[in-house]
Amino acid sequence: MPTLLVLGATSDIGRAVARQFAHKQFNIHLAARDPSKLSALQADLTIRYNIQCLTHPFDAVDFTSHKLFYHTLDPRPDIAVCIFGYMNENELVINNPDETLRTINTNYTGAVSILNIIAEDYTLQKKGVIVGISSVAGERGRQSNYIYGSAKAGFTAYLSGLRNKLYSKGIHVVTVLPGFVYTKMTEHLNLPERLTAQPEDVARSIYTAVQKRKNTVYVKWFWRWIMCIIRLIPEPVFKRMKL
């Protein structure tokens, strides 16, 4: 039975991904800063789907702990999904150096740290799948969230380079660009209903992308064209826009 690692399993998307893959008969490793919050999910997945589900402490910004964390997983995961992220109001992030670092380290540096370790292991095995959840916010900097967006832009570029490097090793890398999603992280935002996905939509998209070995996935198809239009706006015009 294959095994999935969920990095950021207490998030709404993390829980949905775990349920989706458990339903497809994957054993599950749930990893989060506070694994005690995962006990109910662990019990439910184990009983409902008759799989093995284990919980593990994992802190995205405690970089020195990442290697030990990964190498103590038993069994090692066949698929690793990097879901954790952090977003606060842009003005708060700009004016608070701790918030700036937290945004960058959670959304970029921490993800790169753990995925480098996983990629090294998969290279030795000559197999494996890595899934990273980035954001359409990284496709063009906007005044409303450019710190978060710049971190996600870096993560998108990282996943692209990793996919390029690992392809010849038999390892597949998927970049997921969800657009707006109803989660705890976005509950303070007034999101447009028609443009916003549910965590379960993201989970199904990830499972399909893994099975079909897709490279880049927009959870809601129209985000591909929305972002294409935004990228094509000339800079003299774009810089005057309130986005």
Image (cartoon, grey):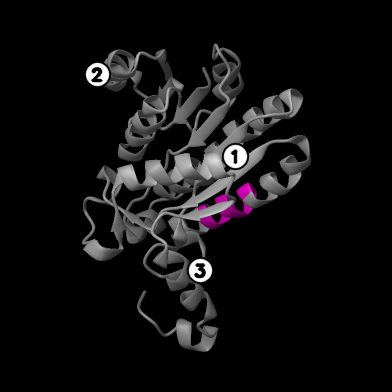
Q: Is residue 54 left or right of residue 192?
A: right
Q: Residues within 10 Å of mark 1 (few under 14, many from 20)?
A: many
Residue underneath mark 2: 40
From where the camera sits, is residue 62 visible? yes
User: Does residue 173 belong to the magenta stretch?
Assistant: no
Q: Nearer the viewer, mark 3 or mark 2?
A: 2
Residue underneath mark 3: 140
First reached walking from the N terminus: tag 3 or tag 2: 2
Q: Residue at x 44, y 55 (%)?
A: 148
Residue 36 appears at what percent x and percent y? 30, 17
Viewer-side residue, 100 vs 67? 67
Magenta residues, as a range?
A: 152-159
Q: Looking at the picture, which amino acid does disc 1 mark?
A: Val
Residue at disc 3, secondary structure:
loop
Residue at disc 2, secondary structure:
helix
Q: Looking at the picture, which amino acid does disc 3 mark?
A: Arg
Q: Nearer the viewer, mark 2 or mark 1?
A: 2
Residue underneath mark 1: 112
Alpha carbons under labels 2 and 1: distance apart: 29 Å
Q: Residue at x 42, y 43 (%)?
A: 85
Residue 226 appears at what percent x and percent y? 43, 72
Viewer-side residue, 77 vs 209? 209
First reached walking from the N terminus: tag 3 or tag 1: 1
Alpha carbons under labels 3 and 2: distance apart: 39 Å
Q: Residues within 10 Å of mark 3 (few under 14, many from 20)?
A: some
Residue 94 image-quadrant placement = bottom left
Residue 42 appears at what percent x and percent y? 32, 17
Q: Residue at x 53, y 39 (%)?
A: 211
User: Does residue 155 belong to the magenta stretch?
Assistant: yes
